[in-house]
Amino acid sequence: MYAQAYFAYDSKKSGGVTISHLRFGTQPIDMPYLIDAADYIACHRQSYVKRFDLLRGIKDGGTFMLNCTWSDDELEHELPARIKRAIAKHHVKFYTLNGDAIGQKLGLGTRINMVMQAAFFALAKVIPLEDAVKYLKDSIVKSYGKKGQKVVDMNWAAVDAGVGEFHEVSYPASWADAVDEKTEGRPTTEYFEKVAAPVLGQIGDDLKVSDFTGREDGTMPSGTAKFEKAGPALYVPSWDHEKCIGCTQCSFVCPHATIRPVLTTEEERAKAPAGFQIAPKGKSGKEYGFTIVVDQLDCLECGSCANVCPTKALTMVPNDDDERGKMDLWYFAQDEVSPKANPQNKKTVIGSQFEQPLFEFSGACAGCGETPYVKLTTQLFGDRMMIANATGCSSIYGGSAPVAPYTTNEKGHGPVWANSLFEDAAEYGFGMFMGVDKIRKDLALKVEAAKAVASPELQAALSDWAANLLEGEGTRERADKVTALLEKEAAGKPVLEEFLAKKKYLVKRSHWIFGGDGWAYDIGFGGVDHVLAQDQDVNILVLDTEVYSNTGGQSSKATPTAAIAQFAASGTTTKKKDLGMMAISYGYVYVAQVAMGSDKNQLMKAMTEAEAYHGPSVVIAYCPCINHGIRKGMGKSQEEEKLAVACGYWDLFRYNPELKEQGKNPFSLDSKEPDYSKFQEFLEGEVRYASLAKGFPELAQSLYEKTVTDAKARRESYVRLQKGFEA
Amino acid sequence: MYAQAYFAYDSKKSGGVTISHLRFGTQPIDMPYLIDAADYIACHRQSYVKRFDLLRGIKDGGTFMLNCTWSDDELEHELPARIKRAIAKHHVKFYTLNGDAIGQKLGLGTRINMVMQAAFFALAKVIPLEDAVKYLKDSIVKSYGKKGQKVVDMNWAAVDAGVGEFHEVSYPASWADAVDEKTEGRPTTEYFEKVAAPVLGQIGDDLKVSDFTGREDGTMPSGTAKFEKAGPALYVPSWDHEKCIGCTQCSFVCPHATIRPVLTTEEERAKAPAGFQIAPKGKSGKEYGFTIVVDQLDCLECGSCANVCPTKALTMVPNDDDERGKMDLWYFAQDEVSPKANPQNKKTVIGSQFEQPLFEFSGACAGCGETPYVKLTTQLFGDRMMIANATGCSSIYGGSAPVAPYTTNEKGHGPVWANSLFEDAAEYGFGMFMGVDKIRKDLALKVEAAKAVASPELQAALSDWAANLLEGEGTRERADKVTALLEKEAAGKPVLEEFLAKKKYLVKRSHWIFGGDGWAYDIGFGGVDHVLAQDQDVNILVLDTEVYSNTGGQSSKATPTAAIAQFAASGTTTKKKDLGMMAISYGYVYVAQVAMGSDKNQLMKAMTEAEAYHGPSVVIAYCPCINHGIRKGMGKSQEEEKLAVACGYWDLFRYNPELKEQGKNPFSLDSKEPDYSKFQEFLEGEVRYASLAKGFPELAQSLYEKTVTDAKARRESYVRLQKGFEA
């Protein structure tokens, strides 16, 4: 017996699709291509019947196995017409199995792989069933034996259930003539319909080269993640307007930008759908009502918003019919409510959330610790950002084809985003800066020549523009003013025409380089260091999960001593590298270390100071990650960040070279003296540390202690630095 | 008229050979190969007639132009027979020109290129002579116009001299039968004769693949630079034994290991050649006499030894017949004097020089600031060193094929040396460490099994070996003891046989990674950082010239603010990166910054502590370089190092993690409070700084001031660090 397997994955961080193409035969298999005519097709997730044309290519008389919770009667209602037609026309043997119910019953939860494998062997009959069962059970002993007899027994029971509990569906011949449901979707774009939708529907291979005409340079439109709508969530945050004080922390911490404050006038509210409420205590300026809306179709149910809510105005509830109706409130806020001038200071925690996130609905994991930082940067600087992204989680959720989570505001302004390689992000972003900077400075040199042929009004606008050439604050307004006047005056005046032709360079860009610790501490560190050393106005955001998250958790130089990582199963033995301290050694680099869950105000200061500083900046952000195995769950990642700082695991600081120039202490250790007695609690709350005690009990305690010692030594070095500058 | 030119260079840092292959014609030239039949051959350096078969391939009736100081009569004596035969047999038109005399007369010194070019056009007649002269003179105006009329006039005069002052030699027909002189050379090796000598003689292209049989793995024998003997030097250090106090500083600072102390017994001296003296004040232990000997055939005449001599026992004198005779003293010391046990502590300045340099006669520039450090490491640890070398000067002078300056001692032990890429030296050296470490630790795990079948004597030796597994001090003796016993006992006992088979791993290796600042601060920094972070026992030596020396002086992140470097002609504007401070941030890395010329004792401490530390070490060594344009000359590079430290340009420090473990202050700022008033004097003493004032007078002062400010800020950060650890 020979076998061959191809697996097709997508690159989503969560909710990704895997398709397994398996061939079996008594002859060697030499078929180096995917299967396009199948004897057996199984679907392990019921929602896929609506998203994908699953039975494309099934053979006449083939078998279709669907894992679902539906009864035969419900199938009539739930199956789309195209699936019904394929079943009936090809005389498919159609089986269902409630794998999830079996999993729950056996204590395996959502792990249904064993059930579905067993069902496959029972129906596909590639080897005698009793052999298959024996092999499966042997493999279970091999894989799970170490985890104890209970786990083995559960999985053996799953095999028996898979063999015994499926059920053949008898369907009416009339399915052959099933008629497509009329679906009325929300408007998308031509690109989305022509390119993205087929790719998302797993038929991207059918696209023709000509479908990409007009995109020869490889750029892709942004703002397309919103059309994907993978939901609906099973649990959603439900908002109690009476309790809400309008602090916007829910929106601040949301990894997917699916919960947002919305400001409405009375006039707008008059047209609102039923159930649209305003919070009496909302901090929204006098003239507006304050409402929290939820995008249930993009929410990943992490619960971060509800966990962070100080007044319990948000609770996670089952997404029943009542809740589902509230999706209309989201669409109302998106479609009918006009953008409002920020009633608060956008540099504050609350004020930042009245700015539109220009990063939304990314494919990051539920509860991701990274995306709230990324989202925040787009709220603060997004309409003039250029981002070079290292490879890693942030490049996957930031730009997985065919859709883009980076988007634009009502004026069409939003981040420019690109990823080149894992290791060159710093250099790549520096190049973006150099190109733009050169053009802008060349223009600045021509201001006097331009003024010589300009109206007094344009002269004043140009002078103002040149005087504030490098200032981000207000740059859009200055650029708009110059542009408006140029449009009136430029015709026939070459120097003004040049300014007009280069009008997009009038705006001071906000240059950012994003990447994880695998990039910043290890593989891309040479570039990070080199770019920081150049003393130019670029900003680096390090999303520090202390591990190579995207590839499954290998140890990086950001990994602390006792952490278990891939290839470091008995713990890392070297302490975490102090990237911030290294950057500080330059003296002219703005450096901050932050943790949103511990101190949002410090984070806001760090982000705005870093961006405003006319030199290189690096912000190192602590990011909980699924690879940490946080026992409380990823919905508590904000709380975990708080504990990390409180126990001394992570320090908050800012080093601002401008203060030194002013004769002040440039270094501010922002997190107070930690309570090291909580350190062990923190370590034990995460599997990456806790599992060390299980696997290597003797080693664990000494490595735990070294981790504390390392953290104390690091803190001491910060205290020394702060005191040194005081003296 | 068409022209084609190929230039063949060697990679020597000094005294290298360039061969220019030029073709001219009225048709386009499509000959993608070197010239093997020449109409015109010119030799610009008279000593080459003895080293190379210059007239190989000259056409019948061709022209040979020799730049030499010889009269026609002297030619009879000076020209080797093979040159005479070629001239006579091919009826060559033979001309001479005393370019050096012309250069001296015109004030051009050794710059004879213009003279020789003019002579070429006069004799080769590729274009009308008057056109050639016009073009040459126009090109002089273009190239040197900015340097003033005087320089232009000197070069114009050189052209006129080149055209007018050559002289045709009439030679006897008997030259056709000239007979080869019998030369009695010192013994070399088969490899040298078969492979190296032809390559050095510029006929390496004639070597056959079969000549490399036995070297398929690419390894090359070490200890071959000594056979090259490019000299003799025109000026050599002459030693006055009466004045010498035996401090060995001359030997310490010599870049080429061409001046050394030698210890002799009375018995040995009885066989010494005439003129072999001992210094009455030499510090050589009671039983030995102390002598300084000079290898005039490898000395590059930098004068460092004489400049550093505290008692003026050394003076640079013309290498006349008297001096030349002293080469016999060198050979006597090499061939007849037995190695002596070191009468001093080898960890001291004086003691280190009684150890044999295992790096000698490299192709580094005269007065090179790097090679004295390299040589010193080989004196201290050379018999058990493994060196991974980054690309740069140190790889060129360290391993230019076909000869190797790294050598072995009388027991055949010496450094293993290799260069892979510019950017991977740290990783490459780390791999060497990992491989050796694994084998040694595997052996250590088998010690108990070995002891079970060993004699009591071998048991004790094995126990001692295992107990000191990671100690460098005494490792050779322990390994020799075990090996000697194994040779007696191992037969038939598999575990002992395994130890014997791996006997070379019994010695604790001293792992070193060498490179310049272009490597350590820039291109290889990612690797340097990564390897330091691994907390393993490897040593990094950074030869910091503050510039990419090997490629002609481009700016690196080690280049300070006001320095003019390639592509930074108006000065660098960012301050020097603090590599040491970055390494210190790890806490477990031994870090030292040294400058031999300022404090040899501090250097000795740094080198020996770095090597002895059972973890990663990095020693950053200040190295004057020809690219600095030191006005005093490269013979004063030690003095320049002293000034650099005294004025605050360079700080000396050591950070020793072991002290921290002992509760002591790990950081020692070893150079005393600088006298910043000397800073400007230092900068103005080097062209890399001084030329800034010429080209950009306004900018220069502000950049000078920034350089001082940067140096002060850096010093302050060291003071802060030291005080911080005290508090």
Image (spheres, coloured by chain):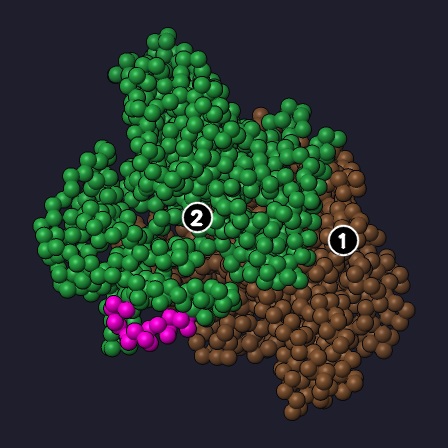
Chain colours: A brown, B green
Q: Is residue B348 visible?
A: yes
Q: What secondary structure is marked by label 2? A: loop
Cα separation, mark 2 vs mark 1, equals 38 Å
Residue at image point 44% right, 66% down: B153
Q: What secondary structure is marked by label 1? A: helix
Residue type at the position of mark 2: Gly
Residue at image point 33% right, 57% down: B99
Residue A283, x across and y down, in percent: 86, 62
User: Relative to residue B145, is residue A189 drawn left or right?
Assistant: right
User: B94 or A480, which is in the foreground?
Assistant: B94
Would you call the spot at circle 2 few (<14 residues within 10 Å), some (14-19), or many (20 or more)? many
User: A218 or A279, which is in the foreground?
Assistant: A218
Per the rendering, the mark at residue A718 is none
Residue A580, x across and y down, in percent: 66, 46
Would you call the spot at circle 1 few (<14 residues within 10 Å), some (14-19), or many (20 or more)? few
Q: Is residue A107 visible?
A: no
User: Relative to residue A235, is residue B338 drawn left or right?
Assistant: left
Report if residue A304 lies within the magenta region.
Answer: no
Span highlighted in magenta in the image: B122-139
Residue B555 versus residue B288 in the image, above or below = below
State the residue lying farthest toward the bottom.
A492
Residue A397, x across and y down, in percent: 59, 60
- Residue occupied by mark 1: A661
- Residue occupied by mark 2: B392
Main SS class of the magenta portion in the image: helix
Residue at image point 43% right, 53% down: A120
